[in-house]
Amino acid sequence: MSTNIQQNSNKSGRITGRKYSNPNASDQKIIDMTNQFYLEISKNILSEREFEIMEKILIEKCPLEELSQKYEVGIDRIRQIYRNTLHKVKIISGLLQEITRLKAKRNQLRKKYASEYKKLSKKNIQCLEVSMLSKKISNSCFPFSGRLWSILETMELETMEDLCSIPIRDYLKYRGFKTKCITEFIQFIEFENIEDQFDEFYEFKKKYFPSSK
């Protein structure tokens, strides 16, 4: 809380600021805006009565005697409410500053480790791809037809890597690789999730297996 709203009362019962004993119009406007700001951020933690009293003291510059009469309490009680409310506001201000500091720290850490996370993710993907490509075709759970299986054996393809090393359109050059085999081959590739290992897979699928979803 700024120094302009710290407790200080004169003989008339009015609470004034220690730093701004005789503020000019410009200074007073800044003081009022600051006080209004702190009142607003404290609204949810103050009772309706506390908020009214603080607003009349800080914004309306109401003398303590007038407040004492209005709320039917002693001047000392008004001062006590003022001190207690300032304490609450001070705590909230401290919490807001801590939240701001923690957010800045969080953003700093995010920026620091973002590149490392990307590298780690890329490394994990690469390891997964290596593991996937080293898998033997014979270990696949896909229900091959005798025709397609015979063609793959004739081509001496043992692993997924062997399979993916051949451009997908080149498979059409092999004898017996016709419509049914093409459809089954596309289904096998999707079953093993290796579509992205072929540069033109999606164009190939659209042309030779247009009815698929």
Image (cartoon, grey):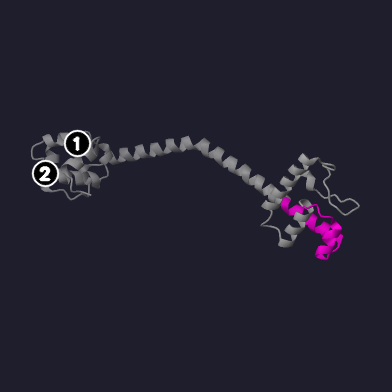
User: What residue is drawn where x is 17% and y is 35%?
Assistant: 169
Q: Give whichever of 201, 53 is nearer the camera.
A: 53
User: What residue is drawn where x is 19% and y is 36%?
Assistant: 168
Q: Is residue 96 above or below residue 116?
A: below
Q: Give whichever of 104, 165 is nearer the camera.
A: 104
Q: Is residue 51 above or below residue 178?
A: below
- Give the mark, 1 or 2, whose residue is nearer the N terminus: 1
Residue 52 is situated, as x and y percent measured from the top left of the image, at: 74, 58
**Left or right: 201 as drawn, with respect to 72:** left
**What span is colored magenta in the figure?**
60-89
Residue 159 seen in render: no
Give the residue type at disc 2: Thr
The kind of secondary structure element at disc 1 is helix
Query: Magenta stretch containing residue 85, yes or no?
Result: yes
Q: How many marks?
A: 2
Answer with the quarter of the image where residue 18 lies: top right
Residue 7 is situated, as x and y percent measured from the top left of the image, at: 82, 50
Q: How far apart are labels 1 and 2 at the CA level?
A: 14 Å
User: What residue is drawn where x is 11% and y is 47%?
Assistant: 146
Main SS class of the magenta portion in the image: helix
Q: Which mark is residue 179?
A: 2
For label 1, the residue is 168
Give the residue type at disc 1: Ile
Q: Which mark is residue 24?
A: none
**Left or right: 213 as drawn, with respect to 99:** left
The kind of secondary structure element at disc 2 is helix
Answer with the quarter of the image where residue 46 lies: bottom right
User: What residue is drawn where x is 73% and y is 54%?
Assistant: 88
